[in-house]
Amino acid sequence: MLTNNDLITVPQAVALIIMTVLEVGLLSLPREVATYAESDGWILVIIAWLLAFICSLVLSTLIRRFPGETFIEYSQKVIGKFLAFAIGVILIIHFVLATAVVIRTFAEVTNAFMLPNTPREFIIIAQMLLTIYLIRHGIEPTARIAEILFPLLLVPIFAMYMIALPKADFTELLPVFNTPIKTMAVGSLYTMLNFFGLEILLILGPYLKRPDKIYWTMFVSVGVIALIFLFIVIITFSVLGVQPAKQFIWPGMTIIRMITAPGRVFERLDALAMALWTIASFTASNSMYLAGALTCFHLTKAREFKFFITILFPWIYFLASLPPSIIATEKLRHIVRWGSVSVGIAVPVIVLLLSIIMKKKGETA
Amino acid sequence: MKKYGKILTILTFLLVLVGCWDMVEIDRRLFVGIVGIDVSDEPNKYTFHFSIPIAREIMGGEGGGGGGGVGGESVSQITTEAYSLIDAARNLALRINRDMYFEHMRIVVISEEVAKKGLKDVLNPFARQTEFNRRSRIAICDGKAEKVMQVKPWAEKLKAEYMESLYASRVMSGKFIQMDLGDFFHNLYTQNGSTLVSKITPNGTEVNIGGAGVIKNFKFIGWLNEEETQGINFFLGKVRGGEIVAEDIGGTGTVTFTILGEKAQLSLKTAEPIPEFDFKAYVTGDIASTSHAVTYDHDKLGTKYIEELEKVISEEIKAQILKGIKRLQEDYRVDLLKLNEHLKKYRPDLWKIYEEDWEDIFPQVSIEVDVKTSIKNVGILR
Amino acid sequence: MTNIFSKLYNNKKEELFFERDMSPDKSRKLKTNIGENLRIVNEYLSDCDDVITRNFYMGQGGKHQMSLMFIDGMVQMQTVQDDILKPLMLFTRQFPLEYNVGEKFFNMVKEGLLTAGDVKEIDNFGEVILGILSGDTILFIDKMEKALIISTRGWEKRGVQEPSTEAVIRGPRDGFTETYRTNVALVRRRLKDPNLKVKTIKLGRHTRTDVGIMYIKGVAKPSIVDEVLKRLNTVDISTVLESGYIEQMIEGDWLSPFPQLRRTERPDVVAASLIEGNVAILCDNTPFALIAPTTFLSLFQSPEDYYERWYIVSMIRILRFIAGFFAFTFPALYIAMTTFHPGMLPTDLVLSIAAAREGVPFSAVVESLIMVIALEVLREAGVRLPGPIGQTIGIVGGLVVGEAAVRAGIVSPIMVIVVAVNAISSFAIPNYSVAIGFRLLTFILMALAGVAGLYGIMLGLLGLTIHLVTLKSFGAHYLSPFVSFRFSESKDTLIRGPMPSMEIRPGYTRPQDLDRINDRRHDTIDKAGDESADQ
């Protein structure tokens, strides 16, 4: 196993989860909720929050039940070796795909807003090299980076949206509760997909320093994510309007293109926002990549997990450059999200239920 | 030592890659200030004008050379014919050795004729591409866009700055439409392609930005004059400044009222068979000049005078609002009063019924206008 | 070089060993015959003309020989004459002829006659040689297998002066000197605490420099003290001329542009750091002491920070951080903004930059490279040249060359401003060597900005963050207290809180005794031990 030092503290875990989940929804979430429920979009966020919270409860309970054990280890006990192995392989594929999608989306947005002529390959490779440089240091440094970058990302983003606030017209949020229940239900399920990334906890569970505080950790992280999402959706709707929010692929960026820094120090902030988004994308790809490498490590029971970082590199690069267009990327992202739901909710639920029925528990619990 | 080697490799790569892709020296770019669009003789083509400041002329020559030397034009203009804006920019690449750069674009001027043909395809690149400044203004000009481009402002070197700062002024904010490209698209998308748009009228060394253009279904259909524009701005609660001039009490002259702020309130009175709205505006302001003496004393005359003045001004504002409404309802039959939005937001159930044939219902909608003015200050003169 | 030296050194027939910790070889014992002893010593110190041997005879007949050996210039001649030679020569003459040299006589000389302060017995050549070389005086007495080593060290030295690299407006003016003992005394004078420990070892095969480790027992974390001692003991180096030799030998990551030990010329800084639980390493022959562990923040701190009132200090600190940021990003930002994202700059500024650059033959990257390199050269030239000329170089370089270059159209005037801001910013960092390190990063960031604009800069900054986050200095996180952040520590970071509010010592050293101001918070000690005890 790894050294004892390589444990994640509670604030680090919170930062890591938030940063991982945030990247995904930050730019496109307003468009999605607007498409599903028009001005009721913000309600979708709240419902999705509750759903995500339930999902996080399942994950937490599993981690509490088998403290210090990896997911592969205890799922072997519960559902048998072969199935556990299969799930492990699926997890690896999922994480590899997720990393690829995160990095590819980043390259896509960078090309659109910042560097139109820079080859996508350069951005992908640069981003991957940076990630590898970090995660080779281990799990705790990865979490530490998330902890350090957390305020560096959130404060400027918050500030930027605040600058847009004078343009806001909050009547855009009207009418309320005007969407049929069915649409709402489906919509909130889809919105829930924006919380993808929570499943890294399946893998990082045994590396938590305080597994007894996992409920608290999850509660805080999911809550903060939901609040940030809510904030962004409300600002986007009220500044941009619901209809335009549907029209733009990344409404979040469109807002930033509409504002100017106070005092006109900067004419426009989009390049700056992109630079900040580098941080978000970087942390998300870190934890996904790390989770992928760790799953390989757990599955093969090797001595050193760093070895797998190198092994996964070509696959992630290949998958990241696979989609021919931005639309294909969005499709792939959608697939990954569904994968995330299945491995992030369905599998844990099954494992948890079976373990309760079979009365299997971790040794120290 | 292995690590050392890796670092060296990466650094070497970096040095090789410097300036490979997106780097363009700042003096190799042309910062387009104004884009003007006119119709062309060829079908489906437009004439595009780009006004580009010449940096070295604007900053003036160093030393004693003096700015107005040979060809001292500080802004130059390029014209080309093309199917779309992007097409135009690419066409120009054959003629110009520098990169056109639109992030500092200040205003897009569209000629009346182009706007009449429809704005959808002309403006699409502005919304779709990221290289255009979304905070640039947009205006429809009376006549040819070229005329606007040829204006030589006498106070400013940069035409684009001059026009943009006109729109940014708060003093006359009621008589023109305050909007940038972002707002423009926002309105188009939320109002099914109808919106008011700024008007620009060239006049030799100046432009006039008073008035507004009416766009319905992405097509220009007519003008509003300054008063009507101000009326609609009052209706939309957007007036933050400007003056109202009315006849003074007793017919002794005129009174000028400076607007400080406005609060507008719209509510639905009855819904059947045709919706009726109640509109209330609360306007605050100062007296800038009168033909009477104003007194603070507790004698009845002074207080009464102010009260009467308030009434006169209210009537004047009300008249403007009604003029605006009438024009939109009768002549243009387009709901730019955002009544549809109001229904949609506050009475989504009703909106479902009206949505289909709102265009026919809107001209018949009756709006009760009530304006309350309060005078805050009368200056330092008694 | 080292090989040649050691060969020369080892060529002697009978070797004298010095252990790894530089303690002398004690196996070769002194002989009974004084002639023999002197011969052997002279064999070791042959061709050393500065070694002086003073022979004299005791007893009325001058029967028994005694010898003094010392190095001219390293001993205080006053002491040698008044406290050694005078009593010995005056009193031993009066002993009766038949008085035998023996244990009794030896003790009488040692305890009754010598008036020097520090006298010790030795019985082997190793210590004799080391004593002579260190400036002590050795007294050989005939027929004795022992000698006396008398401390007479004293040489020409610089007095305590104001430190030149860490000047303060408010605060003590004394700085370290080149003498180890003086330096230790300067610190000791500030900390009259029996728990202030000083451990001295000798480093350097040729130099045998005194190196002292200072810490406060009960405050400094024992593991850090052990770590420092361990690392020092593994140092095997021929020369230690300055504490920089030690610094580079014991720092953890030699690829890092950031120093992992803080160096200071000021005893008050050392004292303050010791109280915060750090370990100080003092080195003979240099006024620069080292402090370990070091954090990134401490590189931006000046001793004055604690003497001035907290508003002022907080403002100055924030300014320093802004300056620190510009010190390595400004030219890169300029490149990124003008060549990649001119949309970000205000239109007027863009036009004026474009106008200024019109006609400049080089690209912005090359232009800024030229200017930054020129500035580095100027700085170096200014440092090396003597005072008045150095200033002239600064003026000539900065004004004349800069102005001429702009006039000639080789660089744009904006570039001159950018580089000037960059340079000035880097000198607002209190630590000179850090400032230079930052300037090194400037080049890397400029290259990155040239490749991918702001994204490139961001890549560089993220890489730097990863490096800083994973960097450790003697077990303490370099970015502490920002990693595993605790609110109580935030009062002495980017800002400095009011003095009464700074109740606890910084946690990165994880001092055993956490309280700084009063004793209210004993319960936090345990807590601090719990949290992130990852060293």
Image (cartoon, coloured by chain):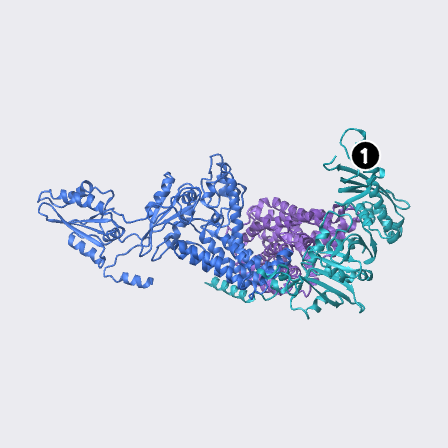
Of residues A259 and A143, which is closer to you in this image? A259
Of residues C145 and A210, which is closer to you in this image? C145
Of residues C23 and B217, which is closer to you in this image? B217
* Residue A46 at x, y percent in the picture: 71, 46
- Is residue B55 left or right of C91 when viewed as pictured? right
Residue B62 appearing in the image? no
- Is residue C127 left or right of A235 when viewed as pictured? left
Q: Farthest residue to the top: give it.
A: B298
Of residues A10 and B87, which is closer to you in this image? B87
* Residue B9 at x, y percent in the picture: 51, 65
Q: Farthest residue to the bottom: give it.
A: B94
What tint does the image give chain A? purple
Which residue is labeled 1 in the image?
B305
Residue at disc 1, secondary structure: helix
Q: Which chain is blue?
A: C
Q: Residue at x 80, y 62 (%)?
A: B114
**Marked residue chain, label 1:** B
Residue C85 appearing in the image? yes
* Residue C517 at x, y percent in the picture: 47, 36
Q: Which chain is cyan?
A: B
* Residue B202 at x, y percent in the picture: 77, 58
- Is residue C13 left or right of C371 when viewed as pictured? left
Q: Residue at x 33, y 62 (%)?
A: C2
Q: Amino acid at mark 1?
A: Tyr
Query: From what the image shows, is residue B82 above or below residue B181?
Result: below
